[in-house]
Amino acid sequence: KMIFKNPKITEYDSWDSAIKDLLKGNVVAVLRDESGVRNIFMESPSLSIRLKTVVLKNFEDNIAIAVNRKNTHLCYWLNLFLETYKTEKNILKIIAKYSDI
């Protein structure tokens, strides 16, 4: 709703169902985080013939982790890590490293 004016939103129980509807032409687009989209194309490279990836650069994709409020040291460390770790530059390395999982 933040990206498109008056969109018709369809929710799916699984990413596979969303992709199937996209390929059938039942929906115009599906929205997911960049790493999730990259994983789909790595699993099924032939999809790149029929689908196009569009990365929305003007939107921040915050990483969040739930931490017990009593564990202040872990919370501090996680915040420091997330502020300093450059996920955009490392996402391809992470996907390649864990692609078999």
Image: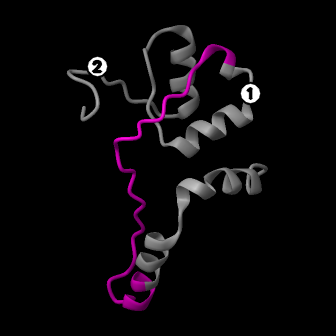
Position of 60 relative to 51 (above/below)? below
**Which stretch did the figure color magenta?**
49-76
* Secondary structure of the residue carrying numbered label 2: loop
Residue placed under numbered mark 1 in the picture: 45
Q: In the visual, does 85 lie left or right of 5?
A: right
Alpha-carbon neighbours of circle 2 within 10 Å: few (<14), some, or many (≥20)? few
Position of 3 relative to 72 (above/below)? above
Determine the residue located farthest toward the left in the rendered image.
6
Determine the residue located farthest toward the top in the rendered image.
25
Q: Nearer the viewer, mark 1 or mark 2?
A: 1
Position of 41 relative to 39 (above/below)? above
Closer to the chain start, of discs 1 and 2, is: 2
Determine the residue located farthest toward the right in the rendered image.
100
Q: Which mark is residue 8?
A: 2
Q: In the visual, does 41 lie left or right of 86?
A: right
Q: Amino acid at mark 1?
A: Pro
Question: Which of the 4 image quadrants contains residue 69?
Answer: bottom left
In whole angstroms, how far apart are the C-alphas of marks 1 and 2? 28 Å
Residue 97's spot in the image, x, y percent?
A: 76, 57
Question: Which of the 4 image quadrants contains residue 40?
Answer: top right
Residue 21's spot in the image, x, y percent?
A: 51, 16
Q: Amino acid at mark 2?
A: Lys
Q: Are marks 1 and 2 in contact (CB under 8 Å)?
A: no
Position of 90 relative to 32 (above/below)? below
Residue at point 44% right, 21% down?
29
* Secondary structure of the residue carrying numbered label 1: loop
Residue at point 52% right, 42% down?
34
Question: Which of the 4 image quadrants contains residue 30?
Answer: top left
Q: Is residue 85 one of those drawn in magenta?
A: no
